Image (spheres, grey):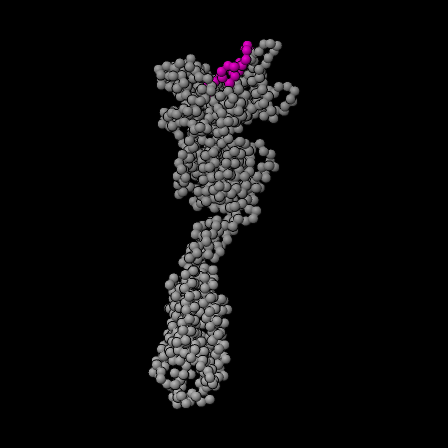
Amino acid sequence: MEPLVALLHMIISIMTFSKANKMVCTLRGEPVHPELWKDGAIIVGGVFSFHSSWEIRQQTYSILPPPLKCISLNFRDFQYAQSMLFAIEEINNSSTLLPGISLGYKIYDTCGSVAAGVRAAMALANGYEKVSVEGPCTKHAEVQAIIGDTTSSACMAISKGIGPFKLPLISHYATCECLSDKVKYPSFLRTIASDHYQSRALAELVRHFGWTWVGALRTDDDYGNSGMATFTKVAEQMGICLEYSLPFFRTYPEDKVIRIIEQIKSSTSRVIVGFLAHWDLEVLLHKFVEHNITGYQWVGTEAWISDSVIASMDKHHILQGAIGLAIPKTQVTGLQEFILKIKPLKSSGGVIFTEFWEELFQCKYSTKNDSVSITPCTGNEELSQVQNLFTDMSLMPIFSNVYKGVYAVAHTLHDLLGCKEKCDLNKQPDPSTFLKHLRKVHFKTKDGEEVYFDENGDPVAKYDIINWHPSKKQHYEFVTVGLYDASFLGIDRLAVNMPSILWANNSTKVPVSVCSESCPPGTRKGVKKGKPICCYDCIPCTEGEISNTTDSVTCLRCHQDFWSNMQNDGCVKKETEFLSYEEIMGILLTTISLVGAFITIIIAVIFFRYKNTPIVKANNSELSFLLLFSLMLCFLCSLTFIGRPTEWSCMLRHTAFGITFVLCISCVLGKTIVVLMAFRATLPGSNVMKWFGPPQQRLSVFSFTLIQVIICVLWLTIYPPFPFKNLNYFKEKIILECNVGSVVGFWAVLGYIGLLAILCFFLAFLARKLPDNFNEAKFITFSMLIFCAVWIAFIPAYVSSPGKFTVAVEVFAILASTYGMLFCIFIPKCYIILLKPDKNSKKHLMVK
């Protein structure tokens, strides 16, 4: 209803009418008169809500709606008006600011109505005299600028109406971020910080106390909705979640209010952020008392956190411990005394002064119909006799904002009128020029406070952090416990004195309001499906991953050389594993290897001692000594597999193993061929030994070994073995091993050994039944059988053994096959040499 009436009045107020060929500028509708006024060379307008409401009337839409009938006197806006009058009087008495110029004022009452505010602004722009003027309506505005209004919604409507005319509107209390939009509101400025900063400051304050799960109530208007939208956006960026965000307006029906109460009661958050106008919170307080909503930690905005009326109403400690942002305390010398000096108001406005006086002193100027019980007003009442909202000076920072707005207008005029000893009224600027210079004005008040506007017409944002402490004299005392300065960067913007804060229920301990408890180090946050990000499960980090901070979002994987500890909150260096000389297995294999080498040396000594005996000479003693030498190398080469792998040890172990084994088997193969050839030579007419004498035997061993040497050289040249950290087999261990490099080279070496071993086994098998009392072929066959069996079993064992056991299997295979050849070939001969010397004769060996 109200917007429709506003639109109708606005159209009537600014409409021009043309009849026939003559253009006439005339005021349509009933004129609107100011409540307070004073003539002057330059007029400053004012728009305040001297009344907070109006009578609701039924509209018939058949006749023009009558003017609003205002009710419920609002002392706060009288204080704002007094602040404006004080500034104008101070400027008029100044000899340095606008000398010779007297400022006047016209102040209107909006009754808390947006429509009335728009009508008042139009009256200030056009004038209110009901006259007709020849020609178009192109005159200058009646006022130089307008001070007001108190609410953001009213300022938005007024600024949209007067913005196209470049008439400045300077608000002392409208904080909606939306008003910083200079496209929509080109002529709007303010002396109070924008909610752009307040919303962010509130979010930083909530985060500072560790509250990540909060509820929110907002006034259902432009101030509350815009401010809460910014708060919600910033809070989400900071990891804060809103369990609920509920709108409220003082005219909401009962069922809607009950739903809000039930939502708060069913919630789990213990903190409520109140982006509320003070009169909306007044209504809510009564409802909270009815439904026993207590024990919540309130976070408030500048609209109510330092309002003594709200504090005096909270008799049931609903808001105890409330904390929030307030406009910094300021002092304007002489302002408080002027506000309380109310009699000069009588000369500015008659009718409203009478109503104000009666309401202030709770008396009545006598009329014929007055009741005897009502105290009559004498006109001599003193403010010292009463204590009410008008005598409360807790909103001095807001009064100062009105004062600064008037001074901004005066300083801009002073510059534009070229004032020195006297001002030139002929230079009075047009609205567009005045607005341009007003945005750039920069001055200091008499108390040293710096005043200027940014590119959006906003001042620098600074807030005191206020905490409600219980007080014996009053219900609460507003204690400053911190400061927020938006001109600083990062964490320096917010400073809070934690020990001085008293929380809800008079507690000194910071309340906890979280959806989920913090996740300790070693865990990460896992969001619950269908829940906000602040509601999560603490999921332990998997093996190899850690989190070393509280509430970690992710687990970090340790570097490949490190592994997570038992608590998963730190990385420790992985244990390295290789076949070491210090461990039992390494010592055992080393001992077996050295024992084998020692036995080989002993056998060689025995053979050397009995080198001229028939059993030693029987199968080419030169090959026997060469075989013993190669067997000793086989025992010793197994030692290269033990110990920490290095680049040289990796290349040496496989090549040494391959060459020594080929040398060993080449000798055995040579001995086998000698046996076969020897028996072939006994046949009539055979001279086969001529073709396989000692030179040929040496050449065959050299040739077989040379092939292996060539294979190893190619292997080492193309892609040699190298030390390698195996991180795949064990997650918590590093296996230090030798990577074979070229797989083809590795298997070529083994394959060649195997080929010679099979060939040797086959020839020895053929010679096993040749007639002789000591046929060496039988022992060679058996030794090759053991050799092949060991290496055939080695392949699956090698592939399946983990870590250092892979190396142990390879060493075991080397030692087993070497021991097999040593014992099978040489132990029977040593037995005869040492224990059966009678059989160590040519005669015995020739016996069939």
In this picture, is 546 found above or below 477?
below
Query: Overall secondary structure of the magenta stretch?
Result: loop
Q: Position of residue 26 (x, y in %)?
A: 56, 13
Residue occupying the point 50% across, 69% down: 796
In this picture, residue 420 sits left or right of residue 847: left
Q: Position of residue 83 (x, y in %)?
A: 43, 24
Inspect the magenta stretch and tell me whether residue 145 lies in it: yes
Residue occupying the point 40% across, 72% down: 702
In this picture, is 566 found above or below 845?
above
Inspect this view and state whether residue 840 appears: yes
Inspect the magenta stretch and tell me whether residue 659 lies in it: no
Q: What range is drawn magenta here?
A: 125-146
Residue occupying the point 36% across, 27% down: 448
Q: Position of residue 99 (x, y in %)?
A: 37, 16
Q: Quadrant of residue 774?
A: bottom left
Closer-to-camera residue (334/679):
679
Closer-to-camera residue (297/576):
576
Q: Position of residue 417 (x, y in %)?
A: 40, 16
Q: Quadrant of the N terminus?
A: top right
Closer-to-camera residue (426/221):
426
Inspect this view and state whether residue 361 appears: no
Q: How many marks?
A: 0
Residue occupying the point 45% across, 36% down: 325
Closer-to-camera residue (680/228):
680
